[in-house]
Amino acid sequence: MKYIQRLTFINIFSISILVILGACSSSPKSNKYDISNILAKDFIIQVDTTRLQKAAISHVVRGSTLQNQGEFALSVIEFQEALRYDKSPGIYLALANSYRNLFKFELAHESVSHAIALDPGFEPAYLLLAEILIPLRKYDEAIQTLEYCYDKFGKVELLIYIASVYEYTDKRKALEYFSKVPEDKLDLFTLYRISELSKSLNDTIRQKKTLLKMIAKAPDNFNPHSVMLDFYLDNKDLESAIDLIFSTEKKWNFDDLKSMYSRVGVFFLMNSFQTDTVQARRYVEKVDNRFQFDEFMQFVGGAVNQQIGDTVKADKFLTYLLKNGENKAFNAVEIAQIYVFSSRWDKVIEVLKDFENSEDDMRYHYFLGIAYMQTHDYQTAENLMLQALKLDSDNADILSNLGFIYHELDDYDKSNQYYKKAMMIMPDNALLNNNYAYTLSEQNIDLQKALEMSEFSLKEDPENASYLDTYGWIMFKMGKYDKALEYLLKSYTNTESISAEICLHLVEVYLKLNDTANAKKYLNIGLDMFPKDKKLLDLSDKIK
């Protein structure tokens, strides 16, 4: 049994959503606590010139000035000159810092090691050493250095630095060190890092507690609330996500508020097959009140209402968008996409038919072509799909649909031609394999090839009624009637809506098995549902 291809618009829709997601998210982007320039933050070396040999002082002053100006290569020369007159740990440290900024980490490591050897109690040198060791990927040495600093100098901030390095090697150990940091020393970014570590370890309880701490620490800061919203959406806790927005929305400006509503809307669109109707209704009611003049939110409101089956409200949102949006032609295609997903083919045609200036958009022809296919106007569908193919000649879905259309128009040569082209691009698609196999079986040619393609489809989706019917029909064509009956009955049982085709196939196989009673049974079922079907009527005359 053939089944209309519906892949392209799913792909298009997914891509559109990803673009929206990228535009809406306000969450921090870092996925590691980057401690570069953190351990030695604002590390401008102030060398105590009172303890230097007189000849070194002028070079140190010039080197420090150049370093402050970002002229690190020139500062290296000055510090090297200074070292000719005085082997001070401060000069070695300044030189190491310049090398670090030039990304010459081996030389920086050598210089800072000299500073520590000359003064084992020189705290800034240890911090710079740890930072230098990280780009050298000597994480264990960096941790040992920082732990030594913590034992020696006892500064709480060092616990954060140690945890940050452990993120590269042992996330659980990183969390252990973060947990040692007093609450009053945890800033928002550090808390965010803890939440991300917890997430990576699937510790949602700790992640949630940490995010709540972020909100408590900065109740009027948008970012913690934004991250909390992402947490709820990641964990499919729609009720909490919507509660969060509703309870804080008066705090945010329009753009931030829209960002939060948009992300919830995108969640609904990306999870359309498991929509929480109760939460969806709560959400779209607020959208209607808050974003009456925002095009994207009107689109989301229409799409979500359509998902939950409220076609009246869906049409209200989408009609407003179609009439008042700035880019009416583009909006028409986007709106048609929503109606395609809900199989409202009359609305697809209604929305698109007046927007011929969308003809440079492949989706205009594709969606309209799908709608006419579904309403069995294959001549019109053919012209639209050919136009779509001109705009996207390597689109396997378009090629496959043309194969389907020409099958329905009984033009098997063209049907085979387009199916073959589609198979060259998308050979592992189960639906395409099924449709092409069925077309070959209808022609009674290349049955072994058809069987292999049908077997591939069934392996991908063993309970698919259309695939079962195709396999059964190939068995029929190969004269294996018992096997054909087994699969055709399974297809009949599994189908969501009985087709004339499956009834026809069952009648044919029962006739071959000389079971006239069952042949009449399925013929009557078919005629009751499809009284004008020509093939069933022809069989009716044959049985009589």
Image (tube, rainbow, N blue to C red):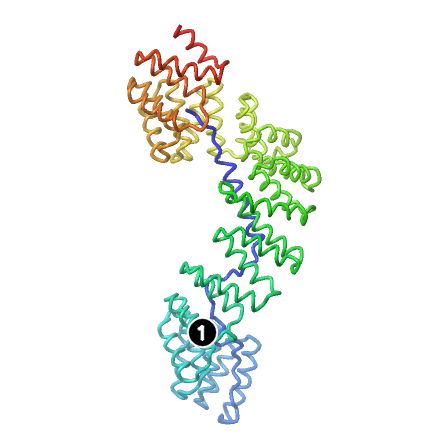
Question: Where 180 sits versus 515, above or below?
Answer: below
Task: Give x and y (percent) for residue 185.
Answer: 51, 75
Count neighbours of disc 1 (C-alpha within 10 A) and say few if under 14, some if 14 to 19, many if 20 or more.
many
- Position of residue 65 relative to residue 334, above or below, is below
Element at label 1: helix
Locate the N terminus by quadrant: top left
Measuring from the top left, give residue 419's x and y in whole percent: 43, 27
Q: Residue furthest top?
A: 544
Quarter of the view holding residue 367: top right
> Camera-side residue: 417 or 265?
265
Please give left or right for residue 266 compared with residue 131 in the image.
right
Mark 1 = which residue?
Answer: 161
Which residue is depicted at the point 39% across and 15% down? 521
**Residue 195 against residue 422 in the figure, above or below:** below
Residue at 32% across, 26% down? 451
Which x, y percent locates residue 479? Answer: 29, 17
Q: Is residue 476 left or right of residue 256?
A: left
**Number of numbered labels in the structure image:** 1
Closer to the camera in the image, 202 or 402 = 202
Q: Quadrant of the C terminus?
A: top left
The residue depicted at 56 percent of the width and 39 percent of the height is 308
Q: Position of residue 161 (x, y in %)?
A: 45, 74
Residue placed most toward the observer, 322 or 360: 322
Q: For the residue marked with disc 1, what is the amino acid? A: Tyr
State the residue in front, 401 or 538. 538
